[in-house]
Image (cartoon, rainbow, N blue to C red):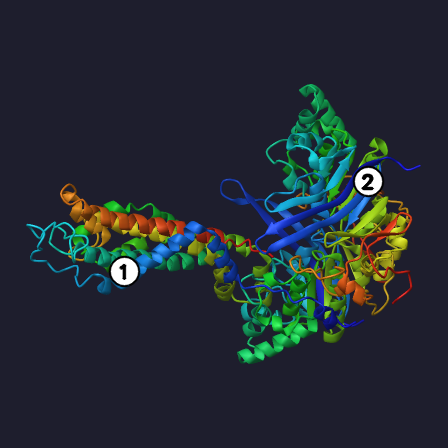
Amino acid sequence: MAEPLLRVTNLKKYFPIRGGVLGGVVAWVKAVDEISFDIFEGETLGLVGESGSGKTTAGKTILQLYKPTAGEVYFEGRLINNLRGEELRRLRRDMQIIFQDPYGSLNPRMPISEIIGEPLIVHGIVKNKKEMLDRVVEVMELVGLRPEYLNRYPHEFSGGQRQRIGIARAIVLNPKFVVCDEPVSALDVSIQSQVINLLNDLQEKLKLTYLFIAHDLAVIRHMCDRVVVMYLGKIMEIAENQELFENPLHPYTQALLSAVPVPDPEVKKERIILKGDIPSPINPPSGCVFHTRCPVAMPICKEVKPELREVKPGHFVACHAVK
Amino acid sequence: MEKDILLETKDLTTYFYTDDGIVKAVEGVDLKIRVGETLGLVGESGCGKSVTSLSIMRLVPWPPGKIVKGEVWFKGEDLLKKTEEEMRRVRGSQISMIFQEPMTSLNPVFTVGFQIMEAILVHQDVTEEEAKKKAIEMLDLVGIPDPEERFYNYPHQMSGGMRQRVMIAMALSCNPDLLISDEATTALDVTIQAQILELMKDLKKKIGMAILMITHNLAVIAEMADSVAVMYTGRIVEYSDVKTIFKNPQHPYTYGLLHSIPLVTKPRKEGERLSIIEGVVPNPYHMPKGCKFHPRCPYATKKCREEEPPLEEISPGHWVRCWNYLKPGEGV
Amino acid sequence: MGVSESAIKEEKIETHGYWYYVFRRLKKHKIAMISLVVLIIIILSAVFAPYLSLGNDPFTYIESVPWSMRAELAPPGPGHPLGLDQMARDAWARLLYGGRISLAVGLTASLLSAIIGLILGLLSGYLGGLTDTLIMRFTDMMLSIPVLPLMVVLNAIIKGSVFTIVLIITVFGWMGVARLVRGEVLSLREQEFTEAARAIGVSPLRIMVRHLLPNVMAPVIVASTLAISGNIIYEATLSFLGLGIRQPTPSWGNMLNGAQTFMLSAPWLVWWPGLAIFITTLSFNFLGDGLRDALDPRLKI
């Protein structure tokens, strides 16, 4: 098995909640609570979960946009947790991110030539303005934006076009690894498919590796080679695409899949309805974090945290009920 | 036997008068909702579905919006001819509405129980004691555990799913004949959305209310709706029962939408691309001539570019607004 | 179908840049537009004072005028539309030249305060932590200093020139902008485009200058415009109290001071500078209000 492009081991990200008279820490938001997985070159790893699952935090922590509370992130075999300053900046050439919100992720007072070109300037890749613009135009054409729009501002574009601008910005440095943080969730249905196709095309053309974060299981099924299912900061299940969707082993994954409505009025779903709400990551349940809503919870689930075990080749589950 | 018609809009037209021009948000919309039926109103952002529901409720802000013509018949009366005072008696008691963001629809400084009580007291002639009792009943009906205690919760103490249930409780507290749900489940997590949809189906059976379900999510429509109206640029482009819409869509937009969404049930094929609808929704200030969908339509002909097609009943109960409506598998 | 083709099918939307919409919104504000015109007239009259003063200057003592017994406090007449002041100087010329001083002080102090406030606000808001605490405590400290009593003390030591007045007003005027900018930066910092900039590897300095600064300009412009009128009144107050611009240099404030004693005998010497201050500050206020609406950053199309 080849060495993974990215390896995450026991990654934790806790956010402090300050309170009290002296502003000390009174509690922690355990957004990401010990996750481990590998991402191999050229693949698309899906990270799926609902609110509070920690998937977005995980993506940003891997990129070192947040400093990890504990655990390690290895990129191309090299530990990147402790990089600072110039070294960290150089790393950014290889690891980039596409954001969810096409409105908030672009500076409203910058023309798109600068939005897309800034990474080139910051990393000193281009020697003069002309070189920068040439490269910007090249990338704009790759993502399907007309070069005449160079000097326009974000508000002059539609949501789908803005997302293309965000994508252009992410790939302009020719990165190896891109975190896609819910890149189509905020887009209209008819635009989503355009952007999904674009992301696939770019992956092929530019040999990109994706960490694809989403809550829409249909999009995950279409895009991803392997899938990681998260709940309250922990990994519940990891499996290859087909295996996960056709043979989900973790009760949460099963419930999640059964909850997704299907655009076919003749399909009558046998739904697994989970009781209750998603608990808060400030005070996650003991033992298995899912036990409070799990339809097959056993006494041990409340006491002992289940290990993520490989129960079939390439299929990992963290559940006491799965043999 | 056809069930009674509860709500019917005829040629409902709402325009917005802005500095940049007139936005024809809703153009000649004809809808029919029968007693106990769920009508799904589906379309993407800017198609006018929300404005349609606001127009029915006469909640369109003026300025800049105005209902310029049409009729909204509800239980034998034209809502557009009522006074504001009369409308207030309709809203919340005969027609209720729930929205996408329950956090902003609920008042943060009052308990949820109080807010439900208030809704009851405004419309019904009962004592406070009775209203409180009814409110607790409603909380129980929508599946909130320990309703007597939860009565005293504030909105911020509840999760998104719970708050949406409170909204539904409020909306149903006066036994409305029609519930308008405007993207009410869009912001919810998938497992919570499943709970709420099951609840709605359950309540529909129990109370027999009609629902106008507005969403851009085709899967939710497939699950909840009895009939479907597809909207594009303020117009209805296709209208039929839910099975026909999904199995035999005739309008290229409907067809395109249905075929462009990834399916959670479909196994992935290496290198497969989603089929797409080309282009974007037209700028509301610069709408194209003729059929509003023609710039994006793979089957557009000269006639489409020049004349706007009317909404025609191409087979019993199936209306389409297209000169070249499709038969599945056929091209041009 | 290729990716580019779907882009090509997208219609060309006719839109305009940011300032176009700002100006269009400003035009709707009738009062702000009128104020703008009034201010342009006032500023031009200050700039072209030498040409408008009908050959007079603010310093020359006129020997005598034909229509009045004494030159001092002479009422308006030919060649001297506002008459002469208590030292027999042409009041019209003094008004024009005084305008220069008052406006210059108001505008300069406002500009300098804005610059200082911007820098400190950006640093404080973006860097947070110790920097933020230090700057904010310093701001609080400055805000608690009573300026007028301080001026009385300094007055004994320092000669009140235009330079020192501008300095004083600036030194005690940047705090409002700093706090305002800091607040804006705190909210902008959480926006995704700032995160995106960090993800690219943009340095904090560049983030502050290229990303945050353009987005905080709107409230700063509004605050500074409104501050101009405050500064003009401030200068007028100081000069009126004898703490500001010293004679013989005219400023609207010290003209009021000089004319106090003669309110009954030559009331026009009080009206005109007073009216000038009133109209100017009112106009800046209206303009500031109009700009506030016009620059509203909720421009999302």
Chain at tag 1: C
Residue C48 in view: yes
Amino acid at the residue labelled 2: Ile
Above/below status of A86 relative to B158: below
Q: Nearer the viewer, residue C98 or A184?
A: C98
Above/below status of A126 relative to C259: below
Residue B276 in view: no
Amino acid at the residue labelled 1: Ala
- Residue C46's label in the rendered image is 1
Q: Secondary structure at mark 1?
A: helix
Which residue is disc 2 drawn over?
B33
* Residue B296, quarter of picture: bottom right
Q: Secondary structure at mark 2?
A: strand
Residue B167 percent location from the top left of the image:
71, 36
- Is B56 positioned to the left or the right of B266 in the image? left
At 60% from the left and 47% from the top, the residue drawn is B64
Q: Nearer the viewer, residue C263 or A137?
A: C263
Q: How far is the residue under mark 1 from the one under mark 2?
A: 71 Å
